[in-house]
Image (tube, rainbow, N blue to C red):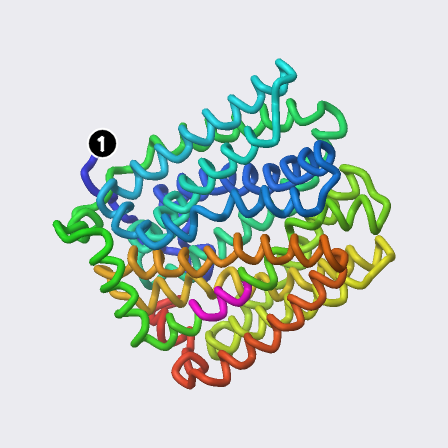
């Protein structure tokens, strides 16, 4: 196996060009299994906890355990990934996924599964996810080149969004037909498939390995935070990401509550709710690809974030199942701009040396979600799920527009400038 990837020069233009790079196709295949597992896991764990405890607070708390490691390992993920190597980090993460899901299957089959088992499993998966996410994002420019990074993110978002739709639907169907045991067995098989594909990736390039120094992980990340503080495009992304993960995305933890207690649905109905935003996401991807060269990247990112939050305000107070599905589809349109532009702006605005650390800082911003899940669980317990989701998402929309208005360089970020060379 070569020491560094032999990056192919795409002959095709447009956002599909990265698919001509064989190493990228392998990563994309692994990512498809990875996303599918994540969305299925979210559905099955939430439903299982709700059935075990009958408590919205416990459902939100298990989501907190899953995301809490991002607050700790998110800060150090960049230096850790550079030290271990991006490929090795992804391989190790899939091994842990396999072991955790296999253990849950064994506990279910022996009728010994307890809530604390799921809590420990969520913590372990959160730790490896924080490292895996940083590695999968940081490796993209190595495989396709900086000029094709936004194109690669668009293709990855399309594949990830297919899993966003299929994962909840498949998860709900498997729970209904085979029970949680069948769902967790499927998660273990997806980890095996991802592991096999990742094994065929080349070793990290010397450029990637050279970014790891003898400095402490703490010092490296402090330097990284100082770097992004003076880079308004990255700073704007980080601030809005904090807002979204603290106030908007925690709504996902309460989807089982909305499905069963407000909309009168079972596992299949929950699966449809979980996949609805993914349908809108497809339309959002088309819109992002059409306007990204003519609209400021910062405004596109902020507008998509605010649109998603506004759609969820409507969803929070809907009592009709079909209306609720439609509003989740609407919010998914905005989420497409958020997901694609978030990583793209950071990857293209950071130097090669600072890339992993900038992505680690972004992961730290994502780490606000577990605190948001604790908050939304407490609000739902005291005032009900609709008030909790509606108030938090409304505040989120206001703060997003405030951040965009206060950072002029972030607003002026143009994708035809940061990704010079795309479509040439």
Can residue 268 be spotted in the picture?
A: yes
Residue extending furthest toward the left? 214
Residue that appears at 35% across and 33% down: 91
Q: Is residue 233 magenta?
A: no
What is the span of residues highlighted in magenta in the rendered image?
A: 238-244
Q: From the viewer's side, name the closer residue of 136 and 381.
A: 381
Instruction: Residue 241 in the image: state x and y as whole percent.
Output: 49, 65
Q: Nearer the viewer, residue 236 or 206?
A: 236
Asked if the stretch drawn in magenta spans residue 242, the answer is yes
**Toward the viewer: 121 or 312?**
121
Q: Residue at x 67, y 63 (%)?
A: 331
Say which residue appears at 55% left-offset and 75% top-offset: 400
Task: Check disc 1 and report the residue beneath it.
Answer: 1
Give how far across and how far down residue 336 sits, in percent: 57, 61
Q: Where residue 125 sits: x, y (%)?
A: 47, 37
Q: Can residue 170 be seen in the rendering of this structure? A: no
Q: Main secondary structure of the magenta part?
A: helix
Left/right of residue 57 with respect to residue 149 in the rendered view: right
Identify the image quadrant of the C terminus. Answer: bottom left
Q: State the residue at coordinates (36%, 42%).
A: 22
Q: Secondary structure at mark 1?
A: loop
């Amino acid at each position: 196996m070569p020491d560094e990837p032999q990056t192919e020069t795409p002959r095709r233009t447009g956002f599909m060009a990265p698919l001509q790079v064989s190493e990228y196709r392998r990563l994309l295949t692994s990512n498809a299994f990875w996303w599918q597992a994540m969305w299925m896991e979210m559905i099955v764990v939430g439903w299982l906890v709700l059935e075990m405890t009958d408590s919205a607070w416990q459902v939100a708390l298990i989501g907190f355990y899953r995301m809490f490691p991002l607050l700790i390992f998110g800060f150090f993920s960049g230096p850790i990934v550079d030290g271990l190597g991006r490929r090795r980090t992804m391989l190790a993460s899939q091994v842990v996924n396999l072991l955790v899901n296999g253990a849950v299957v064994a506990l279910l089959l022996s009728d010994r599964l307890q809530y604390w088992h799921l809590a420990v499993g969520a913590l372990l998966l959160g730790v490896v996810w924080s490292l895996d996410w940083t590695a999968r994002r940081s490796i993209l420019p190595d495989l396709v080149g900086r000029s094709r990074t936004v194109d690669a993110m668009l293709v990855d978002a399309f594949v990830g969004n297919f899993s966003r739709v299929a994962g909840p639907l498949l998860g709900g169907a498997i729970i209904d037909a085979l029970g949680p045991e069948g769902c967790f067995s499927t998660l273990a098989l997806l980890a095996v498939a991802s592991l096999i594909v990742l094994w065929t990736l080349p070793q990290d390039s010397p450029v990637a390995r050279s970014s790891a120094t003898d400095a402490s992980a703490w010092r490296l990340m402090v330097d990284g935070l100082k770097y992004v503080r003076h880079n308004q495009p990255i700073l704007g992304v980080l601030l809005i990401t904090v807002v979204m993960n603290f106030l908007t995305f925690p709504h996902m933890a309460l989807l089982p509550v909305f499905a069963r207690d407000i909309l009168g649905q079972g596992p299949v109905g929950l699966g449809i709710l979980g996949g609805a935003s993914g349908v809108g996401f497809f339309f959002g991807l088309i819109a992002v690809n059409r306007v990204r060269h003519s609209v400021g990247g910062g405004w596109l990112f902020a507008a998509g974030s605010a649109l998603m939050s506004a759609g969820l305000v409507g969803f929070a107070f809907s009592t009709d199942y079909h209306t609720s599905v439609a509003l989740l589809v609407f919010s998914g349109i905005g989420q497409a701009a958020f997901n694609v532009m978030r990583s793209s702006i950071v990857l293209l605005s950071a130097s090669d040396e600072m890339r992993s650390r900038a992505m680690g800082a972004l992961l730290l911003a994502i780490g606000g979600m577990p605190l948001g899940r604790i908050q939304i669980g407490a609000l739902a317990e005291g005032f009900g799920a609709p008030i909790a989701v509606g108030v938090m998402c409304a505040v989120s929309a206001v703060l997003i527009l405030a951040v965009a208005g206060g950072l002029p360089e972030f607003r002026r970020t143009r994708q035809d400038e940061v990704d010079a060379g795309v479509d040439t």
